[in-house]
Amino acid sequence: MSRIKIFVSRDWAPIRLITLTRVLALLVVLAVLIMAGALSQAQSNFTVIHNFTGPDGAFPTSAPTLDSHGNLYGTTLGGGTAGWGTVYELAHVSGFWILYPLYSFTDSSDGYSVFDGVTIGPDGTLFGVTHGRSDNYGRLYNLRPPAHLVCAGALCPRNHVALHSFSGGSDGRYPTGNVVFDFQGNLYGTTLGGGAHDVGTVYKATPSGGRWNVSAIYNFGASGNDGQNPEAGVVLDGAGNIYGTTGGGGTYNCGTVFKLSPSGGGWAETVLHSFMGGGDGCFLNAGLVFDQAGNLYGATTGYARGSGTIFELSPQGGGWNFSTIYTFSGNGPASTLAIDAAGNLYGTLTNRSAYDPGTVFKLSPSGGGWTYADLHDFTGGNDGRYPVGGVAIAGPGGYLYGTTERGGANDDGVIYQINLGAR
């Protein structure tokens, strides 16, 4: 909502009564319009809560991360002081959303290509990766408030700490996806390339004496049936097993779902499903989510190898049962799904075209099957276009938060909110 500033002259003599009357009437009209706008916004289930302008960031390609107070944190691919992207906080203050740029990436010294979001670490600071490019294989970084600086938390700039620069060799290159922590404070992620067979790794970063030791714990491509090129990071279960997806590879070269289990001081891989490119789908850009019963959900994009799908993997008798629970008429989600406590799945679709600005959808379990619903169809205008980053969810029946890469008031992308309770 816009704030209206009224400046009144100290010299009252020239102001006629009729002028004051007109000013008061105008203020009444403006107040009515503002209240009507606020009411309309409150009743709407979809609201743009921030339009990026360039200096504060541009082209967000990942979903925001929520903290326990309902504030949002995320990244942009472009914009900022040098044009290489930003990390931002969007704080909810007295009914308003206020964006604070926390860090602007500068050049190869701190990273290129901030495609992925941030993770709030055990110490409350932010962790993430930059993807890199040909002269820079990506970095693992940490943002933390400056030491010994007294300021309001949201207003503090963040210090950038490079935890690891990927070499492109045994540790991998081009880290992808949000990182995740285990109960001991170790960090895990994936690289798209590099490693022993040059088709990607799962890596582990262990804090030790103020430093982080990073090493690949699994190298993809060890066999012809193994997956290749993971794009979406990993998830962990309570026993410390690691699960993820690969964009390609597998028996049919359509990607896999894998599990890594601690074994004899190392890690043993199990391929839970190798996609065939038929009814089960093909090519995975999205990662996995668990429901409360321990079932895994993910998505395939399809692209040139058929339609996209959403699938479920359920633990059964020491193995895993695979089922396709929904098939799209075109491409499927390119970003990891979100899930609420009731088991509803949420995601986004886009072909990045003028004819398909994108959609936010919900998939609900119903009578042994699943029911699909559109939550918002983007117009490509002020509501944004290309919601490539997926969504984050705050509580059952609460709110969805997401971003669009382009569109909005400045065509630099938006952050939006969907009120699930208003539907």
Image (cartoon, helix red, strand yellow):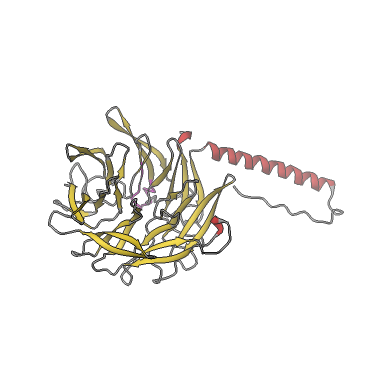
- Which of 6 and 154 lies nearest the eye of the viewer? 154
**Depth check, front residue: 99 or 214:** 214
Quadrant of image for the C terminus = top left
Q: Residue at x 21, y 61 (%)?
A: 199
Q: Is residue 59 left or right of residue 132?
A: right
- Answer left or right for 36 relative to 313: right
Q: Is residue 3 left or right of residue 283?
A: right
Q: Would residue 305 be found to the left or right of residue 419 on screen? A: left
Q: Is residue 421 above or below residue 71?
A: above
Location of residue 365 by image quarter: top left
User: Quick check: can you spot residue 103?
Assistant: yes
355 part of magenta stretch: yes
In the image shown, does 131 or 4 lie closer to the viewer? 131
Residue at 18%, 64% in the rendered image: 197
Q: Quadrant of residue 394?
A: top left
For the image, the number of numbered tags is: 0
Q: Is residue 176 part of the magenta span, yes or no?
A: no
| Residue 328 visible in the current orientation | no
Q: Is residue 294 above or below residue 407?
A: above
User: Residue 196: percent from the left, percent from the top?
Assistant: 19, 65
On the image, the x and y values in percent for residue 101 come to 51, 59
Residue at x 37% of width, y 65% of height: 209
Residue 315 percent coordinates (x, y): 22, 39
Q: Position of residue 216 (x, y in %)?
A: 25, 62
- Main SS category, magenta section: loop
215 or 200: nearer the viewer: 215
> Range of the magenta residues?
346-358
Residue drawn 31% across and 44% down? Answer: 289
Where is 56 relative to 324, above or below? below
